[in-house]
Amino acid sequence: MHKFFNLFLFLLIFFNVSHLHPFVVINDLSPDEIWTKTEFVLSGHVGYSGYINVNQTMDANLFYIFWESLDQNPDAPVLLWLQGGPGCSSLWGLFKENGPLLIQSDGSLLTNPWTWNNNYAILYIDNPVGAGFSYSTNPKGYVTSESQMSQDLYTGLKVFFAKYTKYSANDFYVFGESYAGKYVPAIAYRIHEDGNKLNMKGFGIGDGLSDPSLQTNYFADYSYSTGLLDEQERIDIKLLEADLILQIENQEWDNCLDNFEKITNEISELSGGINKYDIRLYQPYDSKPITNFLNLQSVKDTFGANSDWEFCAKETRNGLKIDFCQSVKPLVDVLIQSGYQALFYSGQFDLIVNYMGSSNFIEQINWSGKQNWLESDRVVWKNNDEVVGYVKNYQNLYHILINKAGHMSPMNQPQNTLDMVSRFINNKPFS
């Protein structure tokens, strides 16, 4: 089995608003060959940021922000957070979802009472190279596959833990969202294959795209079940889905991303312009406040960032177009069979990576507990005596539906997603 997956990876390689932010910079350490670090205080809490050069030949640099746990527990698990896209910045997750500070519509900062940082150290990395503040001075420094991405990221993680040695023995979890449904298994598998030297205990994927062939044939059914489409429209969308699945089966990768987006854009148009990330909305998310904030020179100086910031980088996205419709399911199979804790969660109102498609993918994961998983009962999850979701679990595999949430569940349900993560990491029951 291991030979098969080693072969799989081998083939993969070939195929003045400065007053709005109360930052105080303490010191800017001199960079060594591959590392820079800026230490700052935000509302009494110390944070660290900088760059890790992950490919000196290509001058490829990953940007990171690291927050120590607010409860000051030296043994707190370390969580890595990765945004999707492909090519979107993990600082969106920091400042809009689960970080200690949230950027408001006027560009001001608000303390997040439900930040995952309350009990966990969190490392946000703009991944892959080109996303957010990450950059390369050589166009060849941008990745075109999950194998290349995971190699860069693993290099960055090894450097990070070598520098932050006091966290090197802490439990480590990889979390991500959306297209990070590819990133998370890829980096987790690489860590696993190298003997798990980072003490990784598990991973979590929110509304993640991991296997388009198993997840993209539910757009029509989900949209019909929620009243966005009538029967004839459902049939029409089903035909587009079938074309996309055939394209994937034939490994015609070139236009796969475009055809994927064609389906969701068509549903949005037919339904009057719904937000495909949250069908309760009829307007896109506003990224201007965070974009304006992070491009303030004072903010970039605070973080030691030396490039401009954009939410989602077209160059990085285009580099992964061929990768978009390929599957990382074989990696997920190995990780779950190997006993790592695995959390998949889905927002109730997410169309683009909906619960139905994610369920289909999870039900087809190959591991020794598969039949017991399929036969296990889904339970009601309550938080503060309120029904907040539904949980299916057997042994180390969890799939959770989060009520009243879209594609970015921590943004819509911050208290409940914190409860979810805490139960998952501490192995506490949901019922």
Image (tube, grey):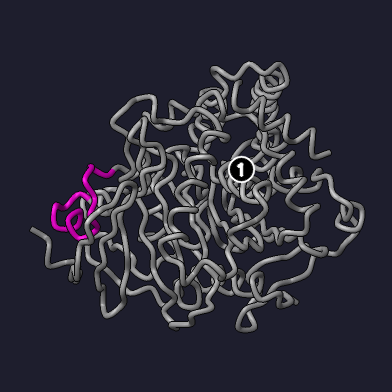
Residue 404, image quadrant: bottom right
Q: Looking at the picture, how far across and down is residue 214, in whole percent?
A: 73, 36
Q: In the displayed structure, does residue 317 sit left or right of residue 340?
A: left
Q: Looking at the picture, how far across and down is residue 176, in whole percent?
A: 54, 53
Q: In the displayed structure, does residue 187 sit left or right of residue 330?
A: left
Name the residue nearer the viewer: 25 or 219.
25
Which residue position holds label 1? Answer: 186
Q: In the displayed structure, does residue 379 sit left or right of residue 206?
A: right
Spot the residue most to the left: 16
Quadrant housing the C terminus: bottom right
Name the residue rendered at 37%, 54% in the picture. 64
Q: What stretch is highlighted in magenta?
A: 295-309
Name the residue rendered at 20%, 62% in the picture. 28
Spot the residue most to the front: 33
Name the residue rendered at 49%, 56% in the picture. 81
Residue 387 visible in the snapshot: yes
Q: Is mark 1 on a helix, strand or loop?
A: helix
Total number of numbered labels? 1
Q: Looking at the picture, how far across and down is residue 157, in whole percent?
A: 48, 53
Residue 123, image quadrant: bottom left
Residues packed near mark 1 inside 10 Å, few (<14), some (14 to 19) or many (20 plus):
many
Q: Looking at the picture, how far across and down is residue 237, in whole percent?
A: 64, 27
Question: Does 117 appear in magenta?
Answer: no
Looking at the picture, does residue 270 appear above or below residue 302? above
Question: Does 297 appear in magenta?
Answer: yes
Looking at the picture, does residue 292 appear above or below residue 328? below
Quadrant housing the N terminus: top right
Q: In the displayed structure, does residue 310 sit left or right of residue 368?
A: left
Residue 227 visible in the snapshot: no
Callout 1 amino acid: Ala
